[in-house]
C-alpha cells in the first residue's frame, strides 16, 4: 500500500482504477428519536455532483441499483470516525424513496455508544460519512447525453453497494453536505476494494482501459492499482488519521483565503472538490483578484425569459404534484422537481441568479433572501394560482345548468327591465305612430358585491416545508367561492314568490310523478306576459330537485314504461323529456319542495352577474414585513338576482 495517497496518485489513475476505488459521501443526521435510540439520514440522491476529478457522478437511487447485501447479512456496522474498533450502532433500515437513499441508525447500549448518542441528541455531532463502492458504471462521454438528459462527461453508478457508515466529528467539507462524492483515501485494503468490474460506455458496450486510460480488450493484472495485498504490514489508523488531518487542513486553508478575499462559493467549491493544493489556490487567486480589479464592463449572464418561464413551470407543477393535485400535462422536469423541498428550490433559484454563499445560509436567512427574489415570489404566486384555478374548475356545482350569466361594469345598482302592457308588437296604420313599450313598472335591481379571504405563507411554513398553504388551501378556498354562488342561486330559486295568483305553484303537492309533473308542466305552459293577455307556452327543460327525490326522478324520466301505470304496456311520456338537476343545497333549504324550469332565456330567470365578465376569483399577493410572510388574498365580485317568476313552477312536495 502506498505510504501516502497524495493528489498525484489520484491524478495518474487510469479510468479502470477510478472505477474500482471505494468512495464516500458526506451526510447530515436528521431528527433524533430518544425512545427508540434511532436517528435517520438521507445519504445519497440522484442529483449530479462533481467527483474528485471534476466529472459529474450520479448515483441511481432505487432498489435495483442500491445493493444492501452487507446490511441484510448483518455485517454493516456504524463506526465512530471510521475506527473499526469503535462500533457505536447498527443500521436498522436502508431504503430508497423518490430518488434518494435513506438509512436509520440505532445506537448500541455500550459506554462509548452512549457518549456518542448523547452528543448527537444534543446537536454537537451532526456529520456522517457513508462509504460505498460502485459495481457497474455507465459512462456518458463528452458531447453525448443519457436517455434522461444527463450531459457528458458523466459517470452514472447503475449498481452500487453501501458497506460502511461512520458518525464523524469533523466532516471533510461541511459546506457541501449530502451529495459530495470523493475517492476513499484510506480503505484500499483487499477486503473493501472489489475485483475489477468493467464499466459501460454510451450505448452499453463493456470496456476496460490500459495504464493511460485507453480502451483495450486485454485483461489487466489482478492488482492493477499497485495497492499492497493484505499481507503488507500497514498501520491503518495512522494512515487514516494523517489523510484526514491533511484534507481538513487543506479545506481550512482554502476557506480562510476565500473568506479573506470574498471569493464566490462556486470557485471555492471547485478548488475544494477538485483537490487543488493550497499553493495552486494562491496562484489562481492572484488571477481571480487581477480579473476582478481590471477596469472593464462586467456583463452578468442572465437566463432568457422563455427558459425562466419553463423552469418556474417545472417547479410549480412539481410542487402541485407533490401536494396531490392532478395535472394532465406537467411541465418538462416537474417529475424531478417534485422531490425537492421548498428550501432546495429557494437555494437553486438563488444560485441560478448568481447569489453568493447560498449554501451557507441558515433557514431564516434563506427565507428572507428568497422572498426578495422576484423569481421565487413569482413561483409562489404561480403555484397558488394553479391550485386556485383547479379548485374552482373542478368543484361539482349545478347552478350553471339553469341560471343565466350577466355582466356589470361597476358596483352601482343596475336594473333589468321587462316589457309592460302588451308585449306583442302592434300594427302601425299608414302614417301612424309606434307604440312605446312601458319599461317603468317592471324592473329588477341587480348589484355586485365582493367576497374575499386572505392568508399568509409564513417563515415557519417555509422551514417546515408545509405545502398546504401553497397548494391545498387555495384549491379548497376557490371551491368554497363557487359553492357559495351555487348555494345563493338555489336560495334565490326558493325565494321567488310562488302563488296561485302568479300561476306558478302546484295546487296538489306530492313527489315527482306522472300526475304531479304533468300538472306542473301545464302551469309553466300557461304563464302569460305581463299584460295577462297572451300565453307564453313555455316548455319545461329542467327538473330541479333535492337529493330526496333523486332515485324517484331517475325512475320517472328514464323508464320506458310509466312508473304509475297499471301494467308495463303504458308508455312513459316523460322519458328523457327533462334534464334532472340534483343539488343538496335544496336539501338544506327545503328537502321536500321541487321545481321545474323553462330553458334559459325563454324568459328572464335567475341571473349570476360578474364584474366585467370575470367568473374566477382574483389572486393578489405581497410581502408582509410585519409577520415575516408572503400575504395572499383571493376575492370575487358577483351578484345574484331573481328577475322573473314566470320561468319556474314549484311543488311543495310530500
Image: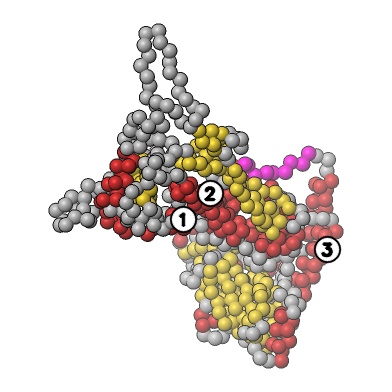
The local crowd at label 3, few if under 14, some if 14 to 19, many if 20 or more residues have their Cα within 10 Å, is: few
- Identify which residue is drawn at 36% across, 11% down: 429
Frontmost of labels 3 and 2 is 2
Gap between marks 3 and 2 measured at Cα: 51 Å
Residue 152 lies in quadrant? bottom right
Crowding around mark 1 (Cα neighbors within 10 Å: few <14, some 14 to 19, many 20+) is: some
Q: Is residue 136 above or below residue 516?
A: below
Nearer the observer, disc 1 or disc 2?
Answer: 1
Q: Which residue is mark 3?
A: 256
Q: Earlier in the sequence, mark 1 or mark 3?
A: 3
Pointers 1 and 3 in contact (CB under 8 A)?
Answer: no
User: Dot 3: what SS?
Assistant: helix
The residue closer to the viewer here, 294 or 507, is 507
Residue 581 location (% of width, % of height): 38, 50
Magenta highlight range = 297-305
Using residue 574 as the reference point, say whether residue 185 is left or right of it. Answer: right
In the image, taking residue 185 as reference, residue 287 lies left or right, namely right
In this figure, which residue is indicated by the disc labeled 2? 389
Name the residue beneath numbered marker 1.
589
The residue depicted at 43 percent of the width and 18 percent of the height is: 435
Amino acid at each position: 500500500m502506498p505510504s501516502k495517497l497524495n493528489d498525484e496518485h489520484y491524478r495518474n489513475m487510469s479510468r479502470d482504477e477510478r472505477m474500482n476505488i471505494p468512495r464516500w459521501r458526506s451526510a447530515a443526521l436528521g431528527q433524533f428519536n430518544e425512545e427508540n435510540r434511532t436517528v435517520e439520514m438521507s445519504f445519497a440522491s440522484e442529483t449530479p455532483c462533481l467527483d474528485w476529478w471534476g466529472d459529474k457522478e450520479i448515483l441511481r437511487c432505487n432498489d435495483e441499483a442500491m445493493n444492501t447485501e452487507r446490511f441484510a447479512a448483518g455485517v454493516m456496522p456504524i463506526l465512530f470516525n471510521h475506527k473499526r474498533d469503535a462500533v457505536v450502532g447498527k443500521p436498522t433500515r436502508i431504503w430508497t424513496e423518490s430518488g434518494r437513499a435513506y438509512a436509520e441508525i440505532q445506537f448500541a447500549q455500550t459506554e462509548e455508544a452512549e457518549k456518542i448518542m448523547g452528543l448527537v441528541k444534543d446537536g454537537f455531532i451532526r456529520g456522517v460519512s457513508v462509504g460505498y463502492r460502485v459495481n457497474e458504471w455507465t459512462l456518458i462521454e463528452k458531447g453525448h447525453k443519457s436517455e434522461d438528459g444527463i450531459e457528458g462527461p458523466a459517470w452514472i453508478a447503475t449498481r452500487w453497494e453501501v458497506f460502511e457508515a461512520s458518525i464523524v466529528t469533523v466532516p471533510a467539507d461541511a459546506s457541501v453536505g449530502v451529495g459530495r462524492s470523493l475517492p476513499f483515501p484510506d480503505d484500499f485494503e483487499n477486503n473493501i476494494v472489489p475485483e475489477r468490474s468493467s464499466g459501460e460506455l454510451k450505448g452499453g458496450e463493456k470496456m476496460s482501459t490500459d495504464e493511460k486510460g485507453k480502451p483495450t480488450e486485454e485483461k489487466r493484472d489482478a492488482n492493477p492499482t499497485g495497492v499492497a495485498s493484505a499481507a503488507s504490514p500497514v498501520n491503518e489508523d495512522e494512515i487514516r488519521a494523517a489523510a484526514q488531518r491533511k484534507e481538513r487542513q487543506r479545506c481550512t486553508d482554502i476557506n480562510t483565503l476565500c473568506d479573506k478575499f470574498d471569493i464566490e462559493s462556486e470557485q471555492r467549491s471547485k478548488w475544494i472538490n477538485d483537490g487543488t493544493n493550497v499553493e495552486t489556490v494562491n496562484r489562481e487567486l492572484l488571477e481571480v483578484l487581477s480579473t476582478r480589479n481590471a477596469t472593464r464592463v462586467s456583463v452578468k449572464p442572465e437566463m432568457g425569459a422563455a427558459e425562466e418561464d419553463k423552469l418556474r413551470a417545472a417547479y410549480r407543477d412539481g410542487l402541485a404534484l407533490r401536494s396531490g393535485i392532478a395535472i394532465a400535462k406537467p411541465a418538462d422536469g416537474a417529475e424531478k422537481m417534485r422531490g425537492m423541498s421548498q428550501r432546495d428550490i429557494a437555494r437553486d433559484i438563488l444560485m441560478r441568479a448568481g447569489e453568493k454563499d447560498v449554501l451557507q445560509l441558515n433557514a431564516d436567512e434563506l427565507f428572507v433572501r428568497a422572498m426578495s427574489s422576484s423569481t421565487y415570489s413569482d413561483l409562489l404566486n404561480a403555484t397558488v394560482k394553479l391550485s386556485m384555478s383547479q379548485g374552482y374548475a373542478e368543484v361539482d356545482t349545478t347552478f350553471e345548468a339553469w341560471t343565466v350569466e350577466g355582466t356589470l361594469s361597476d358596483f352601482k345598482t343596475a336594473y333589468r327591465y321587462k316589457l309592460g302592457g302588451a308585449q306583442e308588437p302592434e300594427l302601425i296604420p299608414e302614417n301612424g305612430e309606434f307604440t312605446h313599450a312601458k319599461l317603468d313598472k317592471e324592473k329588477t335591481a341587480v348589484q355586485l358585491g365582493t367576497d374575499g379571504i386572505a392568508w399568509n405563507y409564513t417563515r415557519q411554513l417555509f422551514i417546515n416545508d408545509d405545502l398546504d398553504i401553497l397548494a391545498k388551501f387555495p384549491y379548497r378556498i376557490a371551491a368554497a367561492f363557487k359553492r357559495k354562488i351555487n348555494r345563493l342561486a338555489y336560495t334565490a330559486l326558493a325565494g321567488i314568490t310562488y302563488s296561485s295568483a302568479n300561476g306558478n305553484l302546484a295546487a296538489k303537492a306530492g313527489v315527482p310523478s306522472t300526475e304531479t309533473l304533468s300538472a306542473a308542466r301545464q302551469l309553466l305552459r300557461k304563464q302569460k306576459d305581463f299584460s295577462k293577455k297572451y300565453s307564453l307556452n313555455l316548455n319545461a327543460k329542467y327538473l330541479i330537485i333535492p337529493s330526496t327525490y333523486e332515485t324517484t326522478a331517475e325512475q320517472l324520466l328514464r323508464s320506458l314504461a310509466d312508473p304509475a301505470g297499471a301494467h308495463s304496456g303504458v308508455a312513459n311520456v316523460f322519458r328523457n323529456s327533462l334534464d334532472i338537476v340534483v343539488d343538496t343545497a335544496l336539501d338544506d333549504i327545503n328537502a321536500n319542495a321541487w321545481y321545474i324550469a323553462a330553458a334559459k332565456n325563454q324568459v328572464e330567470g335567475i341571473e349570476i352577474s360578474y364584474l366585467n365578465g370575470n367568473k374566477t376569483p382574483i389572486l393578489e399577493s405581497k410581502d408582509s414585513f410585519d409577520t415575516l410572510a408572503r400575504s395572499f388574498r383571493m376575492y370575487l365580485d358577483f351578484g345574484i338576482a331573481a328577475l322573473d317568476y314566470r320561468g319556474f313552477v314549484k311543488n311543495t312536495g310530500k
